Image (cartoon, rainbow, N blue to C red):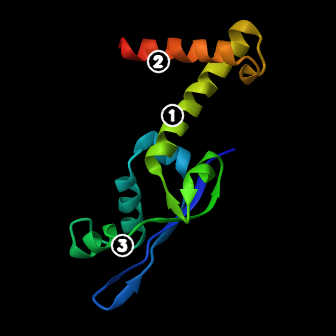
Amino acid sequence: MRNKITASIRFCFKGQTHEPMLELDIDEFMRTSQKIEGLYRLLAREGNFDLYSYEYEMMQAEPIRIKNASGLITQYINDEILDINAFAAAWKTSQINKKLSTIAQTRLNIDDLTQQPDLQAALFDAYTLGQENK
């Protein structure tokens, strides 16, 4: 299941209340940014705010609210606030496990790697070791 969200932020500037909102494929966002600051920039663009303005600074002082979430990300939202660091770690692990599942299916004819947790852990460790040696 794809990770999708509706992100919004509500803030006041010069007596006006602003609430830019956007629907986001969080998988694509994670591939390119992985930092919460990236969400602020996207919301600023959605609201037509200059990234070098006091208005943008005021916006960054408020938390980003997450609604209508689907996928893995739902486990990392509490009271409409996303724990981006915990989600980023889980998302990265899930992306690695998808690749490992493909390898297990292609090379070992294993259709569901999660049914063999020892093998999955060994493949994950080998992947991690390979990344450390780059």
Tag 2 secondary structure = helix
| Total labels drawn | 3
* Residue at position x 60%, y 17% in the image: 121
Nearest to the eye among marks 3 and 1: give it. 1
Residue under numbered circle 3? 48
Q: Is residue 38 above or below residue 115?
A: below
Give the quadrant of the N terminus. top right
Q: Earlier in the sequence, mark 3 or mark 1?
A: 3
Cα gap from disc 3 to disc 2, whole angstroms: 41 Å
User: Which structural element holds mark 1?
Assistant: helix
Q: Which residue is mark 2?
A: 128
Badge 1 or badge 2: first in the primary sequence? 1
Q: Residue at x 70, y 12 (%)?
A: 106
Q: Secondary structure at mark 3?
A: loop
Image quarter of residue 23: bottom right
Who's the residue at 56% across and 60% down the image?
78
Cα distance in 3D space between marks 1 and 2: 12 Å
